[in-house]
Image (cartoon, rainbow, N blue to C red):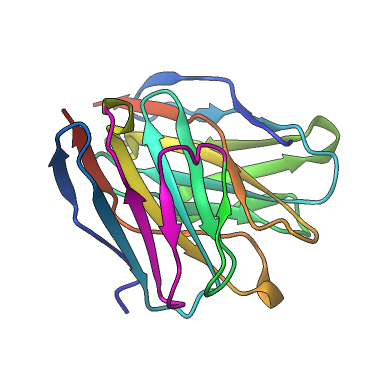
Amino acid sequence: NAGVTQTPKFRVLKTGQSMTLLCAQDMNHEYMYWYRQDPGMGLRLIHYSVGEGTTAKGEVPDGYNVSRLKKQNFLLGLESAAPSQTSVYFCASSYSRTVNTGELFFGEGSRLTVL
Amino acid sequence: AQSVSQHNHHVILSEAASLELGCNYSYGGTVNLFWYVQYPGQHLQLLLKYFSGDPLVKGIKGFEAEFIKSKFSFNLRKPSVQWSDTAEYFCAVNQVGAGSYQLTFGKGTKLSVIP
């Protein structure tokens, strides 16, 4: 199993450009998450999804949009990138509602630089 | 909202020294507790977890953690660190109950082990 896969791994954008990060999981997990990691800030939740077709805001949702059209995929979009969105983005997934232990499985991260 | 506090931002130890990293959380209800590790340039990996039962849990690579409910703490320990333990360590908490889909992370503790 590949687990959680993120693409692309690296991207450089200019201010105002748009882009989409793709997360795919092959573990049949219900829940998926997008976090950003910044030095000294730990991981902060951007958006999450508790099932196909559903999304919800996390701690730092502004400037991002998400979609979960298929259970295995969770897309994070930046419509108009800003330098403050320079970060490392991690996707994660976890088990279904019947086994809600909260354990997350992470992708390898996507490093985004906005100039 | 719950919060997770990790007391040390950066810990520097010599090989063979003992390690204890502090973690406190604010939620008063039932929780699941986790320690994740992030080696340089890599994604987060689960080190150990506590759901219920014996409050002393053992994880991979000789790590263990003790859940002390009265102190809202879940400190990570290792009797003798190695250079390969150099990484960033994150404590995380999940509230058990309806709607508790999220992990809340501490800001992380960077461990540097000197050979």
Q: Image check: A73 left or right of B71?
A: left
Q: Quadrant of the C terminus of chain A?
A: top left
Q: Quadrant of residue B23?
A: top right
Q: Position of residue B59 (x, y in %)?
A: 52, 54
**In the depicted structure, whether residue A22 falls above or below residue B9:** below
Residue B81 shows in this picture: no
Is B64 covered by the magenta stretch? Answer: no
**In the depicted structure, whether residue B114 falls above or below residue B57:** above
Total number of numbered discs in the rendering: 0
Q: Main secondary structure of the magenta part?
A: loop
Residue nearest the observer in this picture, B62 or A16: A16
**In the depicted structure, whether residue B110 falls above or below residue B28:** above
Query: Going 55% across and 53% down the picture, which residue do you hit?
Result: B48
Residue nearest the observer in this picture, B74 or A48: A48
Q: Which residues are magenta?
A: A59-82
Q: Position of residue B19 (x, y in %)?
A: 49, 29
Q: Position of residue A98 (x, y in %)?
A: 70, 77
Residue A108 shows in this picture: yes
Query: Going 54% across and 45% down the picture, which residue do you hit?
Result: B35
Is A74 covered by the magenta stretch? Answer: yes
Residue nearest the observer in this picture, B113 or B43: B43
Q: Image check: A98 left or right of A37?
A: right
Query: Going 19% across and 56% down the picture, which residue do you hit?
Result: A8
Q: Quadrant of the N terminus of chain A?
A: bottom left
Query: Going 23% across and 50% down the picture, which residue do you hit?
Result: A19
Q: Position of residue A45 (x, y in %)?
A: 51, 44
Q: Quadrant of residue A49?
A: bottom right
**In the depicted structure, whether residue A65 falls above or below residue A63:** below
